[in-house]
C-alpha cells in the first residue's frame, strides 16, 4: 500500500490548480497571452505547419534522448505537513528517484511514469529520462516570494557545488523550432524542473516557466539556463497535491512538457471569459484533459496518419490507441473537383475503447473531433459530442459542494451578472440548437436566467455540474453519452444533432453512420454527397422527448427531425400491468406530440408505461430510439394471464411491423399481430423473388408475436446472406402484408 501511495504522489508534481487557473499560469505565455518575443530563439516560428516537436524533440531516435535535470527545493520556514509520509520536511520525497526513467535501456520504462507515457504515446519513438540532483536545496526566504526569485536562488546553490557540472545537460541544439539536433550543443541546458515542497506564490501547481529575471542565468560552467525557451523549464508546487486525482497528476506532468512539443495555448480553449471554452480529450486541454494524446496531437508530432474519406465507402474502426487507426473527412472534400488532400479544416473519426492505461476518457465509443485549422493553437479543435448542441436555461444556483476545490471561474467570477462566485448554476436543456448551441463539455454556458429571453454568457460551470433538481450529473470528461455508440447515437449527418457543420456553421454534405460493432471494432459507412447522405443513411435520433401530465393522461412531445425524406414517427409504448404481463405496441404519427388516452397517470396506480420515439423515412429506414420516458398509473387496457404466464389480450387487427433495427447486421427482430387464430406463414425473399428463408409455417392463436431473423444463420442451413435489400411477407387467413429490410454488412 505504501508503494502505491508513493506512485500516486509522483504525479503531484505538475498539479495546476484546475479550479483557479489563470490564462497565463500554464504554458509559455506572458500576461498578454503571447510568447515572450524578446527572448525567443532566432529560428522560432509563430504559426508554422506542425511537423514534429516545436520546441522539444518529438522523436528521439538512434540512441538519442532528452534528459531532465530535476531539483527538489524547500523554503527554510516551510512548516506545512512536516511529517508527510511522501515528502517530510528537510528530506527528499520518497518518490524522488522513481517518476522518471534514468537510462534508455529501461525502455519501455516502468508503468505510470513520464518516461513510459511518452514512450507509449510515440510508439517507442520518444525517450524522456531524467537525473535527480541528490540533495534537497533549501532557500531562506518567505514562501510567498516571487517564484522566479526563489528559482534563481536554487540554481545559484546548485551552481556553487564544485562537484556538479551543468554542461552534462546540454546535449541538444534547440535554437530552431522543429529542427532539434542531438549531440550538437547550443549553449543552453536542455531541461530543468524545480520542484518545491510548498510555494505560496499565486494559486497554481505547475507552470512551464522558471520565471527568471533577467530571463537567462549564466552558470559557472559556461552554459545558460533560459526561463522558458530554449530550455525546457518547469516550476512545480507540490503543496497543491491534495486537490487532484491520480489522473490529474499524470496528465499535468505530461501536459506541461507538452507545451514544448506543441507550443502555447490549449486545444479546446478560448482565451476570454464568455468564449467557447470546451473541456476536451487529449493531452493539451486547458483543464482536465484525458491524458492519452488524441489523434490530431499524435498526427502533429508525426506519430500517426489518417485514412482520408473522399467518396462513399465503408470501413472498420478499431481502437485508436491500440492501432493508430482513424478517419479524416476533409472540409471541403474536393477543391475544383480534386480531392482535398491537405485540408485546413476537417473531422476526425476515432474509436476510444479505453484499452490503454493512459486512456482516461469517461466513456468508450466513437469520438468525433472538429479540427478548425490544421496547426496547434488556441481553441483550434472541438469535440463533437453525441448528445448534441442545445440552448440552456438556469433557474437556480447551488453552493459549491465540498471537495471540488476553489472557484474555477478565475476571470469570470467578478462579472456583473455573477453576484456570488461561491455558487454554481444548475443548468438544464431548453431546445435543440444545431447551429449556435453549446454542449455539456463547454465550460461557459449561455443560459436564460431569470427571465426567458434574457441571455447571460458568463455562467461558468464547475468541475462537476448539477441539473435543475440539484443532482450531480456531469464531470469534466463527460459521461459515456459524449461518445457515439450503437443504440445510443449512431449517426452524424447534415440533419442530426450534432450535425456535420463546418466552422462557419454551414452544412456539409457528409454523413457518418455506425452500422455495427464486433468486439471493440465498429463498422462504419461514410456518405459524401447530399443525395446518399439522405437516401442511404437512416433518420437522426429524435431528441428532447418530454412527458407531461395533461388532464391526467401522458402527453409526449419531442423536437421535429429535419430530414427532407422523413415520413413520420413511431411512438412505442411498453405497458407493464401490476397484475402481471408486459406488452409493447407502437402508434404511427407525423406529428411531434402524442397523447395516450388509454393510460391515466396516478402515482398510486399499479401499472407502468414506458414510451420512446423512432423516426421513419420514405424508404422504411428507422432511427435509433429516443431517450425513454416512463410513468405509473392505471391502464385502460388489461388482460389476464394464461397458464404459461403470457398475456392474453383481445386483438382487433392484423399487423406486420417494420423490422428493427433496419438496416441490420446480422440480425433483426420482426413483430407481427394476428386478430384471429390461423395458419401463419412468414417468409424472406430476395429482390428477384427467390425465397431465402421460412421463419414461420404453423398454426397460431390470436396475439402479438416477435421473431428474430439472423442473416448469418439461415433456418434452412444455407450459407448466410450477402448485403442487399430483401422482402419479408406475412400471410394468415385472408391477410397478406410485406415489408422491406436492408442487410448492411
Image: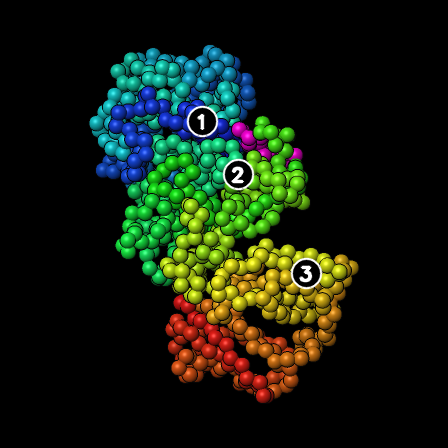
Residue, disc 3: 555
Disc on the earlier residue, 2 or 3 = 2
* Side (left or right) of 328 relative to 452: left
Disc on the earlier residue, 1 or 2 = 1
Within 10 Å of the Cα at label 3, are there few (<14), some (14-19), or many (20+) other Cα atoms?
some
SS type, badge 1: loop
User: Which marked residue is nearer to the observer: mark 3 or mark 1?
Assistant: 3
Count of numbered circles on the image:
3
Q: CA distance from mark 2 to mark 3?
A: 34 Å
Residue 49 position by quadrant: top left
SS type, badge 3: strand
Please report the residue visible at 50 percent of the width from the left and 76 percent of the height from the top: 739
- Residue 24 — which label? 1
Q: Nearer the viewer, residue 113 or 520?
A: 520
- Residue 443 — which label? 2
SS type, badge 2: loop
The part of the chain drawn in magenta is 399-413
Amino acid at each position: 500500500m505504501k508503494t502505491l501511495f508513493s506512485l500516486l504522489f509522483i504525479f503531484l508534481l505538475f498539479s495546476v490548480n484546475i479550479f483557479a487557473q489563470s490564462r497565463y499560469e500554464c504554458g509559455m505565455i506572458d500576461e498578454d497571452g503571447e510568447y515572450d518575443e524578446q527572448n525567443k530563439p532566432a529560428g522560432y516560428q509563430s504559426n508554422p505547419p506542425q511537423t514534429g516537436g516545436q520546441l522539444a524533440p518529438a522523436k528521439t531516435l538512434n540512441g538519442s534522448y532528452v534528459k531532465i535535470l530535476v531539483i527538489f527545493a524547500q523554503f527554510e520556514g516551510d512548516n506545512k505537513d512536516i511529517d508527510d509520509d511522501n515528502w517530510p520536511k528537510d528530506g527528499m520525497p520518497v518518490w524522488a528517484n522513481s517518476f522518471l526513467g534514468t537510462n534508455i535501456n529501461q525502455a519501455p520504462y516502468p508503468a505510470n511514469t513520464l518516461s513510459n507515457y511518452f514512450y507509449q504515446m510515440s510508439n517507442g519513438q520518444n525517450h524522456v529520462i531524467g537525473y535527480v540532483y541528490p540533495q534537497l536545496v533549501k532557500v531562506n526566504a518567505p514562501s510567498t516570494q516571487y517564484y522566479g526569485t526563489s528559482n534563481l536562488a536554487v540554481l545559484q546553490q546548485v551552481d556553487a557545488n564544485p562537484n556538479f557540472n551543468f554542461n552534462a545537460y546540454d546535449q541538444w541544439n534547440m535554437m530552431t523550432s522543429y529542427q532539434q539536433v542531438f549531440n550538437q550543443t547550443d549553449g543552453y541546458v536542455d531541461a530543468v524542473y524545480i520542484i518545491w515542497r510548498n510555494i505560496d506564490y499565486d494559486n497554481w501547481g505547475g507552470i512551464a516557466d522558471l520565471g527568471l529575471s533577467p530571463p537567462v542565468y549564466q552558470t559557472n560552467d559556461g552554459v545558460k539556463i533560459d526561463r522558458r525557451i530554449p530550455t525546457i523549464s518547469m516550476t512545480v508546487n507540490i503543496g497543491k497535491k491534495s486537490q487532484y486525482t491520480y489522473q490529474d497528476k499524470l496528465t499535468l506532468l505530461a501536459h506541461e512538457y507538452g507545451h514544448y512539443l506543441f507550443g502555447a495555448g490549449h486545444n479546446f480553449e478560448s482565451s476570454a471569459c464568455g468564449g467557447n471554452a470546451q473541456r476536451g480529450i487529449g493531452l493539451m486541454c486547458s483543464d482536465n484533459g484525458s491524458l492519452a494524446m488524441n489523434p490530431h496531437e499524435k498526427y502533429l508530432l508525426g506519430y500517426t496518419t489518417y485514412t482520408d474519406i473522399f467518396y462513399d465507402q465503408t470501413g472498420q474502426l478499431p481502437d485508436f490507441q491500440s492501432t493508430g487507426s482513424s478517419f479524416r473527412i476533409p472540409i471541403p472534400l474536393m477543391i475544383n473537383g480534386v480531392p482535398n488532400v491537405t485540408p485546413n479544416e476537417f473531422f476526425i473519426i476515432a474509436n476510444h475503447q479505453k484499452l490503454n492505461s493512459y486512456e482516461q476518457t469517461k466513456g468508450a465509443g466513437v469520438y468525433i473531433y472538429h479540427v478548425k485549422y490544421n496547426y496547434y493553437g488556441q481553441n483550434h479543435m472541438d469535440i463533437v459530442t453525441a448528445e448534441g448542441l442545445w440552448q440552456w436555461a438556469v433557474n437556480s444556483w447551488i453552493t459549491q459542494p465540498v471537495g471540488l476545490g476553489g472557484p474555477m471561474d478565475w476571470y469570470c467570477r467578478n462579472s456583473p451578472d455573477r453576484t456570488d462566485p461561491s455558487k454554481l448554476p444548475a443548468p438544464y436543456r431548453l431546445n435543440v440548437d444545431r447551429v449556435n448551441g453549446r454542449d455539456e463539455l463547454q465550460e461557459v454556458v449561455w443560459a436564460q436566467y431569470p427571465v426567458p429571453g434574457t441571455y447571460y454568457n458568463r455562467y461558468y460551470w464547475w468541475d462537476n455540474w448539477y441539473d435543475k433538481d440539484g443532482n450531480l450529473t456531469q464531470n469534466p470528461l463527460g459521461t459515456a453519452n459524449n461518445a457515439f455508440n450503437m443504440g445510443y447515437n449512431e449517426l452524424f449527418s447534415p440533419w442530426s444533432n450534432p450535425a456535420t457543420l463546418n466552422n462557419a456553421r454551414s452544412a456539409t454534405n457528409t454523413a457518418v453512420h455506425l452500422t455495427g460493432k464486433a468486439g471493440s471494432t465498429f463498422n462504419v459507412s461514410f456518405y459524401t454527397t447530399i443525395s446518399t447522405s439522405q437516401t442511404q443513411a437512416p433518420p437522426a435520433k429524435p431528441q428532447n422527448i418530454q412527458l407531461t401530465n395533461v388532464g391526467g393522461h401522458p402527453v409526449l412531445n419531442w423536437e421535429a427531425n429535419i430530414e427532407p425524406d422523413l415520413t413520420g414517427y413511431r411512438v412505442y409504448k411498453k405497458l407493464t400491468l401490476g397484475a402481471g404481463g408486459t406488452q409493447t405496441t407502437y402508434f404511427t404519427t407525423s406529428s411531434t406530440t402524442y397523447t395516450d388516452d388509454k393510460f391515466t397517470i396516478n402515482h398510486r396506480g399499479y401499472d407502468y408505461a414506458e414510451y420512446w420515439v423512432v423516426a421513419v423515412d420514405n424508404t422504411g429506414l428507422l432511427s435509433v430510439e429516443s431517450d425513454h420516458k416512463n410513468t405509473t398509473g392505471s391502464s385502460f387496457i388489461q388482460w389476464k394471464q394464461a397458464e404459461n404466464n403470457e398475456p392474453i389480450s383481445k386483438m382487433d387487427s392484423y399487423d406486420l411491423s417494420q423490422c428493427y433495427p433496419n438496416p441490420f447486421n446480422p440480425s433483426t427482430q420482426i413483430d407481427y399481430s394476428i386478430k384471429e387464430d390461423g395458419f401463419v406463414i412468414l417468409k424472406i425473399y430476395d429482390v428477384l423473388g427467390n425465397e431465402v428463408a421460412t421463419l414461420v409455417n404453423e398454426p397460431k392463436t390470436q396475439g402479438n408475436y416477435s421473431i428474430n431473423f439472423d442473416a448469418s444463420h439461415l433456418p434452412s442451413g444455407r450459407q448466410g446472406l450477402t448485403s442487399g435489400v430483401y422482402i419479408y411477407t406475412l400471410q394468415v387467413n385472408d391477410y397478406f402484408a410485406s415489408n422491406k429490410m436492408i442487410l448492411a454488412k
